[in-house]
Amino acid sequence: MNQLFWEIIGWLGYLQRASIVFQLLLITVLVTLWRWLRKHPKLAKVPRPLRLLIAPAGLGLISAFARSLGWDAGLLTYLSLSWLGWSFLSLLDGLLQQLMPAQRVHELQSRLIKPLYLIKVVLMFINRLDNVNDLSVIELGQVFGVSLTLGKLFTSLLVSYLLLVGTGPPAAGVSWLMQKLLGYSEGSRKAVELIIRYVVVGIGVTAVGFHIGLNGTALVAIAGGLSVGLGFGIKEVFSNFISGIWLLFEGSVRPGEVLMVDNDPCEVRKLGLRATLLWRDRDNAELLIPNQMFFTAQATSYTATDRLRRSEIRIGAAYRHDPRQVLQLLEETALNVPRVLKAPAPRALQVKYGDSAIEYSLRYWIADPMSNIGIVSEVNQAIWTAFKREGIEIPFPQQVNTIRERPSLMSGRDAQEKPDKTRH
Amino acid sequence: MLAKRRTDQLKKDRLTMASASPPSIVNLRISAGLLLVALVLSGCSALSGSKPVMLYMAMVIGKDDRISSDTQRDARKRVDLIVSSFQKLYPNVQVQLALYQRSKLISELRRRNAADLGPDLVLTDAQQAKDLLREGLTDPLPQTERNTVQTDPTLMEQVRLTDGRLAGQPLVMFPQIACFNTQVIQKPPETLNELLEVGAAGARVGLPVNMDEVLWTAGSLNALPALAAASRNQALSAEERDRITGWLTWLQQASNQRNISFFENQGQLTTLLGRRELDWISCTSDMFFRLREQLGDDFGIAPLPNGPDAPAAPVHLLRVLALGRDSSSSQRSMAIALSDYVTNPLVQRNLSLLSMSFVPVNPDVMIPTKSSKTLASLEKALQASQVQGDNLNAIDQDGPLSRRMTNLLIPLVFGVSQPRTSTDELIPILGQGS
């Protein structure tokens, strides 16, 4: 570790070279100037692709001019080329968006392409200050009796990151292919995708362990340490992780499933390592619920065996209407609503003689459990229209209060002796 | 009413703060920048008496050897031997070392120089130092009286280009020698026949297939004059052709022996001897540090085995210190001072005794052979090569021709091609070097 520290400190020695100091100062001035200039309203009118290229191209021109004067401008050239590369990556956004959704492009750029580019540029710069291969064999210390070098640590971290971030698209591709071959549902496809990712990440992490040089004894030691850790700090994390895998295999909480959470239907969007992401239609909220909640608590699903949902509307009609006519009208009305399924057929029931109306229940089936509230609205509108057309009254509660006699004013003592009979 | 006024005042304050925040951040940055500059300037003025000088040194490790923690430790130890004594004279000098594989040095230096971040010193072999100067990746070494006097003139000629420029300062010479495990081999073989006998007795012998590293066997089998003649484009007699064929036949027969194996290069051989997977190898003395560390008291060295008619022709490694291109004036003057310092007789003698792995380049330094068996063996190896010196110099040992010759030897040692046909193919390749 000390060696690495002194190597890095040693790079400051390049500041002894006047050409390096001059270039660094020039870069600082130019970058500051650009930060000031880019706020200018006229620049905002320049198309974005062109605007992105102005600064690096300008830096490149300045470095070329400096070279033509016989000055050292290598650092300037390096920076301008790196900046140019970065700008091209930003321009790549538009092209990629033609191939995939904007959200995916953003994820790809911010999680994979840009970080990798930055790492590459930094490594190339370090390779100009020193030799990366030489630095990579610097020993940082011992891990379970195995000497850990800077290179091993770096590649392990990089590979682990790539495994976590970069395995998504290939896993999606394989699961899509399997879906085409085996014909399983969309939810199963997403589950298979996740399982493939977990398997690849698991194998990758083991490979990283072997790359570092960990042997069986070391792995046992790690497992021992983990078991202690599980007992104390990371019990919840591990419990959520295992619950997630279990739920995936069980198939009850797969992406695309609809579950009731606090009496609201929510669609499972993503089953993560720690928590499940659900989407609630009512307010477009995304809920992050720890996996173990589904594992230990009761959950209501509308998609466990099929995606049908039975919905119900209660309505009252005046006593003067023939219940048989009302029941028939309700069933016909429901059948005419496009999103209500014809089979199983809607069913109307006479459920109660109420205070001011006879209560009926209309039960019907829908294909998309998430659309329930919208379909309820459509059916209610259709019922109102049908009742109006057929002259069926939807009565509102009416109460008639009759005062039989005016209570007389009496003294308190008389009042006790003669209690008010009307109260009985 | 009072509450409303207070709220208004608060709003006003907030507005004032918001409008003032960007300039205050800029002011803060400017102040921090000025403070930093002041600190740097004050630091520089405080150090002006002995301004620290950082020298960046690019060093080539053994030919095509892989950079590992072992090679790094080994290289740092060797450079520390020089630097620590140099720091007694110039305590303000620090040297930062970067190791490179020989085959990658030129491309890496090209990149570093392009960014104006090239090293101040390059420590490599004579041949590569000349290539670097030809390509403009290093600057020529100014010829001083000191380096003329303190360096063997024949070695100086090895680093001089045809236009008279010096590619670098010869630093040390690492002779090619036999390294072995004394626990397995008590008496090292002195002839090639003895080497075969050692192999037959059960010792695991490793030989390199690289042309320049296996050329010493051509000396032992008296094929070197014929190879040199072919390199000079001279017509070869039938006897000379037979000599070359005899050498190639020996290589093939040796490869057929159960315990004699050919490997890509001496770097691999050294690694395997260090791991005790081989018992006898040919190596250069720059590997001694590592082998001593790995084998301890079991590490033994001896001159390479001679043949029935001629001595072995070891190819020595001349280490050269070349000057980088991007140095500041203080770095350049210190780099030259270091290159002068390393040829100082006292330094060369001390380093030779301390490292026990190289031969000095200063002709005035006598190798204390009586005080050390190792140095005596190195001295013997050096004398052997001087016998074959002219012939060795005639043969291309590093360029593309050497690689083509190596490619010819690989099928031969694995029994795919025959010695006679290999001779017919080898002679024209040698001739292209003249």
Image (cartoon, helix red, strand yellow):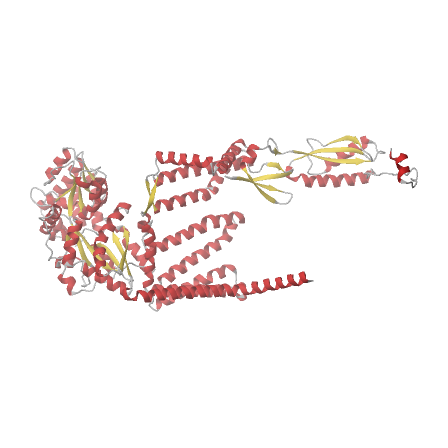
User: Measured from the top left, where is residue A169 in percent x and y?
Assistant: 48, 42
Q: B338 or B7, which lies in front?
A: B7
User: Measured from the top left, where is residue A39 in percent x and y?
Assistant: 52, 64
User: Measured from the top left, where is residue A75 in percent x and y?
Assistant: 36, 61
Quarter of the rendering containing residue A13: bottom left
Q: A204 or B329, which lies in front?
A: B329
User: Measured from the top left, where is residue A300 in percent x and y?
Assistant: 62, 33
Q: B434 or B24, which lies in front?
A: B24
How many badges with numbers are in the image?
Answer: 0
Q: Is residue B20 above or below residue B386?
A: below
Quarter of the rendering containing residue B54: bottom left
- The quarter of the image holding the N terminus of chain B is bottom right
Q: A388 or B297, which lies in front?
A: B297
Quarter of the rendering containing residue B423: top left
- The quarter of the image holding the C terminus of chain B is bottom left
> Is residue A175 among the parts visible in the rendering?
yes
Would you say A131 lies left or right of A402 here?
A: left
> Is residue A58 among the parts visible in the rendering?
no
The extreme left residue here reads B309
Please report the residue visible at 27 percent of the width from the left and 46 percent of the height from the top. Answer: B66
Would you say A79 lies left or right of B345 here?
A: right
Please report the residue visible at 40 percent of the width from the left and 43 percent of the height from the top. Answer: A159
The extreme bottom residue here reads A69
Would you say B9 lies left or right of B252 here?
A: right
